[in-house]
Image (cartoon, helix red, strand yellow):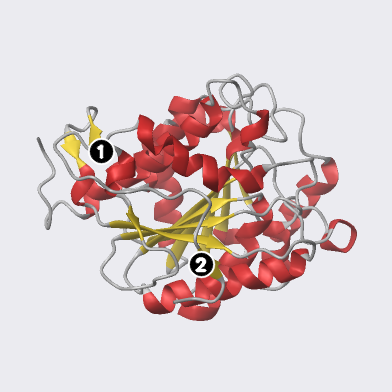
Amino acid sequence: MSEFIGAPATTWNRVEHEDMKVKDWIVPSFGKLTEGFDVVITGIPLSRSSISASAASEYPDFFRKSWQFFSTYSIDDNVDFRHLHVADLGDVKMHGTNILQCHTNIERAMMDIQIYCPNSFYVQIGGDHSITAPIVRAITQHTGKRVGIVQFDTHLDLRATESDGPTNGTPIRQLLDTGVVRGADVYNIGLHGFYNAPSLIKAADEYGVNRITLKQFRKNGAEQQIAEVMNSLKEKVDIVYVTVDMDVLDITYAPGVPASTPGGMRSDELFDLLYEVGKYDFVYGMDFVCLDPHRDSREQQTVKTGVYAFLTVMTSRFVHLYSEKNTVTM
């Protein structure tokens, strides 16, 4: 058990049958931290630290509610990944007004999760992007390893903490300023358009952050781009953490983000990138952040895109990393 994690608002009953939905697959293990799961999910319902007005704190709940629309079978890979053992640990407890206390709770919850679920892949569902900083701090503290970051984002998130504080605009800067990660170990993929100020580009240059624009990625393709990034990181770091800011997507594909922009990534491009990410066993964990269900379309297209992105990673890990111990094909 962890005193920093509680049951979520949405619960469900698992029903195992031939045509399983995702809601029938994921094990509700609220607050019960145990070994034996390939993947553990934690909701982090925090959005008070968002620069833009946001209800991203609602996404963990909407994420779970959308499981009924997805099955455990991937037609693209012709696999049923139901044999991947996945548990939902519940939501990290948030303080009503104190953002720093919220971040402390996230950090302590992540420490507990790593202690009691030592062999799992860790997935966090935000929440705004500020949650990435305490998560990565807990990972480096627990493992003592050098951590690299792959960031899918429209923004650099390098605003100065002195002026902006512990917000969703500063998580990478927080980690760099405190020496938790090194700039050379950060790879931001998907930057585009007119959404990063010259001062942030200057900061990225000073820290040595690797920037891969959307145009560059499209020239390389997903497989080549991720291979280049991962091969470079493998020479420098021990483990990799992946953070997916859903505002990397074009507003057409993701209207439900607080900082939605034109000119961004297509949803299929993000899925392709995440499928490639899932192939690498030194990817330690990841998060999905900055998705506001209340800004979304009536059909909840952004909410469903987030679930699809998560399932894409799960399929890839199942096919490429768990195939020896599981039956993967239909």
Report x, y in % for residue 79.
17, 37
Q: Quadrant of residue 138?
A: bottom right
Q: Quadrant of residue 24?
A: top left
Residue at the disc numbered 1: 72
Residue 180 in view (yes/no): no
Report x, y in % for residue 134.
63, 67
Report x, y in % for residue 328.
13, 44
Residue 29 in view (yes/no): yes
Instruction: State the residue in front, 198 or 306.
Output: 306
Instruction: State the residue in front, 130 or 217.
Output: 130
Relative to 83, residue 29 above or below: below
What amino acid type is highlighted by mark number 1? Thr
Q: Is residue 4 left or right of residue 27?
A: right
| Residue in view at x 53 percent, y 68 percent | 5
Report x, y in % for residue 153.
61, 41
Say what secondary structure mark 2 lies in.
Answer: strand
| Disc 2 to disc 1: CB gap under 8 Å | no
* Quadrant (top left/top right/bottom left/bottom right) for the N terminus: bottom left
Counting labels gives 2
| Residue in view at x 28 percent, y 61 percent | 38
What amino acid type is highlighted by mark number 2? Val
Q: Is residue 216 left or right of residue 23?
A: right
Circle on res. 147: 2
Instruction: State the residue in front, 46 or 250.
Output: 46
Marks 2/1: CA distance? 31 Å
* Quadrant (top left/top right/bottom left/bottom right) for the C terminus: top left
| Residue in view at x 25 percent, y 38 percent | 72
